[in-house]
Image (tube, rainbow, N blue to C red):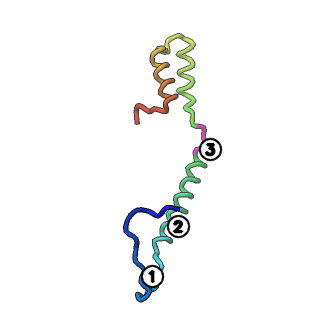
């Protein structure tokens, strides 16, 4: 095994080591993690209850495609396919 480069701490046998009080930070981190997990679970349940699709918008688009009034441009489709392939998000 290779030792890291840099200064190494000196340990003296004559120097006493005192006990360190336990930090309350660990407790706060645990509480925050539990709250985050509960929040994520709540959000997941709310998403599971309703479909993430706007049915009215889908119906409008279907109707426009049937009527031939929905603007389909090959360049836009190609750009979006390339962006999807590259996982690029132009509006973020």
Instruction: Indicate whether 16 appears above or below 11.
Output: below
Does residue 86 lie above or below 14 as drawn?
A: above
Q: Based on the displayed image, in which of its 4 quarters is residue 90 positioned?
A: top left
- Residue depicted at x 51% and y 23%: 81
Q: State the residue in front, 58 or 37.
A: 37
Indicate the quadrant containing the C terminus: top left, top right, bottom left or bottom right. Answer: top left
Instruction: Give whichever of discs 3 and 1 has the lower sequence position.
Output: 1
**Which disc number belongs to residue 48?**
3
Identify the residue at horizontal 40%, vertical 71% (top origin): 8
Please report the bounds of the magenta region as a residue range.
Answer: 47-51
Q: Earlier in the sequence, mark 2 or mark 1?
A: 1
How far across and how far down the image is residue 67, in percent? Answer: 54, 11
Residue for badge 1: 20
Q: Position of residue 54 (x, y in %)?
A: 55, 32
Main SS category, magenta section: helix
Task: Kindly report which numbered mark, 2 or 3, lies closer to the viewer in this rendering.
Answer: 2
Determine if the magenta segment contains residue 48: yes
Query: Callout 2: 10 Å neighbours few (<14), some, many (20+)?
Result: few
Q: Is residue 36 left or right of residue 51?
A: left
| Foreground label between 3 and 1 | 1
For residue 76, which quarter of the picture?
top left
Q: For the residue labelled by badge 2, is the local secondary structure a helix, a strand or a loop?
A: helix
- Residue projecting furthest to the front: 2
Instruction: Nearest to the eye among marks 2 and 1: give it.
Output: 1
Residue designated by label 2: 30
Residue 84's disc number:
none
Kindly report the distance in space between the C-alpha atoms of the residues bearing marks 2 and 3: 27 Å
Q: Earlier in the sequence, mark 2 or mark 3?
A: 2
State the separation of the CA atoms marked 3 and 1: 47 Å
Disc 2, disc 1: CB below 8 Å?
no
Q: Is residue 85 above or below residue 3?
A: above
Q: At x 55% / y 15%, what residue is drawn?
A: 65
């Amino acid at each position: 095994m290779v030792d890291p480069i840099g200064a190494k701490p000196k340990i003296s046998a004559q120097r006493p080591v005192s006990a360190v009080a336990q930090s309350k930070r660990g407790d706060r981190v645990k509480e925050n993690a539990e709250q985050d997990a509960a929040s994520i679970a709540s959000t997941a349940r709310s998403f599971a209850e309703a479909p993430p699709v706007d049915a009215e918008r889908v119906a409008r688009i279907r109707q426009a495609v049937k009527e031939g009034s929905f603007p389909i441009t090959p360049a836009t489709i190609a750009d979006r396919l390339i962006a999807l392939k590259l996982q690029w998000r132009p509006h973020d």
